[in-house]
Amino acid sequence: MKYAIAALFGGLFIAIIFLGLKCVDLKDELAVARTNTAIAVEANKNNMATIETLLGELDKQNQLIKEISDSVAIITRERDDARNALNNMAAENPEVKPWAATPVPDNIWRLFSENGGGNAN
């Protein structure tokens, strides 16, 4: 009977040691999981900061595009107003009529045409 009780206590002791080791392994796995979670959270914060920076740059680019579009619209409107003023002057003023009727050389047309491109420099 003494041996049975000793064997029982020995078996319980081995089971407790086994469970203790298993508990230590689970604690180590939990620590690794917490570390990995912290790394993932930090990476997510960095990604969110990058996304916010890119969205800010996108807003700046959209604002710049809007300003350029507004400038182009103003320049186009001024060009059309100047063209209409010249046509009105040519039609109404006898001194301007012969000057406005003079044909413009092709080189000048290419410089200032919308499709011909080029600049006046």
Image (cartoon, rainbow, N blue to C red):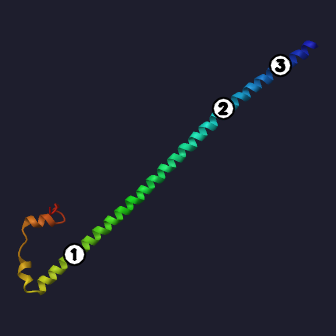
Q: Residue placed at 57% from the left, 39% from the top?
A: 39
Q: Residue placed at 71% from the left, 28% from the top?
A: 24
Q: Which picture quadrant has residue 9?
A: top right
Disc on the earlier residue, 2 or 3: 3
Q: Which picture quadrant has residue 20?
A: top right
Number of labels in the image equals 3
Check disc 1 and report the residue beneath it: 80
Q: Residue placed at 80% from the left, 22% from the top?
A: 15
The amino acid at mark 1 is: Asp
* Tag 1 near tag 2, CB within 8 Å: no
Q: For residue 11, which numbered disc appears in the image?
A: 3
Q: In the shown orientation, is residue 74 left or right of residue 92?
A: right
Q: Element under label 1?
A: helix
Q: Residue placed at 16% from the left, 83% from the top?
A: 88
The amino acid at mark 3 is: Gly
Instruction: Calculate the distance from the C-alpha at mark 1 to the C-alpha at mark 3.
Output: 101 Å
Instruction: Calculate the distance from the C-alpha at mark 2 to the C-alpha at mark 3.
Output: 27 Å
Disc on the earlier residue, 1 or 3: 3
Quadrant where the N terminus is found in the figure: top right
* Tag 2 near tag 3, CB within 8 Å: no
